[in-house]
């Protein structure tokens, strides 16, 4: 059966790519939704060459203008991330993905309300992660979600109920795809 492709933050699949060598495995995404979609995992910070383990990073600046900074060393990693992300967009275009599930709250992957620290080190929940922001700009019509919004029970039920719609023919596949994409497109 043909599966739709979704990009996903790699740590949500259990890949040990976090700064501390850990992961953020989400069993709903792997065990339930994962049966019906093909994931294209991306870890911006690892693919960008920051390594595992690595120093933690955060967004610093103003809500409408911020940088990706290594908290401990004060190194500005924005340019490196942006340059890599722009090239990665071209690769993702070729993958024909239909959406992306991002890790929430990450300075690279968060899609909204990521903490941006001002000069007094006070956080304002205002930003999108650098990679996620570039992705949303590059693919403005693709639905994006983070794992937290998919934790909403209503959405989970909608996804799991779709099992009954899955058949090995194109009509049902298309209606399933349509439903998934519609769910993905729901505004909060
Ligand atoms: Fe990598 Fe994004 Fe997960 Fe951070 S949130 S570990 S950058 S995939």
Image: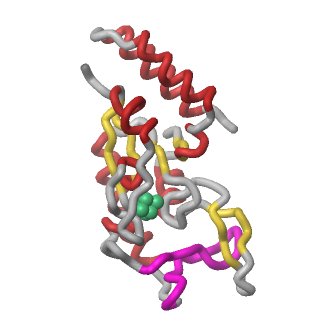
Q: Position of residue 80 (x, y in %)?
A: 40, 76
The residue depicted at 58 percent of the width and 59 percent of the height is 105
Which is more toward the observer, 122 or 7?
122
Task: Note whether residue 4 is visible.
Answer: no
Considering the image in quadrants, where does the N terminus appear?
A: top left
Its colouring scheme is: secondary structure
Nearer to the camera, 138 or 3: 3
Q: Is residue 48 above or below residue 105?
A: below
Q: Please identify the quarter of the rendering in which residue 186 is found.
A: top right
Residue 133 x, y percent position in the rendering: 54, 58
Ligand 1 quadrant in view: bottom left
Pinpoint residue 88: horizontal percent, then vertical percent.
34, 58
In front of the other: 127 or 10? 10
Q: Give me the residue at 33% from left, 67% from top.
A: 46
Residues in magenta, as a range: 55-73
Residue at point 48% right, 76% down?
Answer: 56
Task: Find residue 170 and report its image quarter.
Answer: top left
């Amino acid at each position: 059966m043909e599966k739709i492709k979704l990009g996903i933050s790699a740590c949500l699949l259990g890949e040990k790519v976090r700064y501390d060598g850990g992961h953020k495995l989400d069993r709903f995404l792997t065990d339930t939704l994962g049966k019906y979609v093909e994931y294209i995992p991306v870890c911006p910070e690892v693919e960008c060459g920051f390594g595992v383990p690595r120093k933690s990073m955060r967004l610093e600046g103003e809500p409408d203008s911020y940088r990706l900074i290594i908290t401990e060393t004060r190194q500005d990693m924005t340019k490196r991330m942006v340059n890599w992300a722009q090239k990665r967009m071209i690769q993702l275009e070729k993958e024909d993905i239909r959406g992306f599930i991002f890790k929430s709250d990450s300075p690279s992957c968060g899609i909204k309300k990521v903490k941006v620290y001002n000069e007094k080190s006070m956080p304002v929940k205002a930003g999108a992660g650098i990679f996620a922001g570039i992705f949303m700009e590059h693919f403005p019509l693709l639905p994006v979600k983070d794992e937290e919004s998919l934790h909403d029970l209503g959405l989970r039920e909608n996804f799991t109920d779709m099992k009954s719609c899955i058949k090995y023919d194109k009509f049902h596949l298309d209606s399933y795809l349509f439903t998934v994409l519609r769910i993905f497109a729901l505004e909060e």
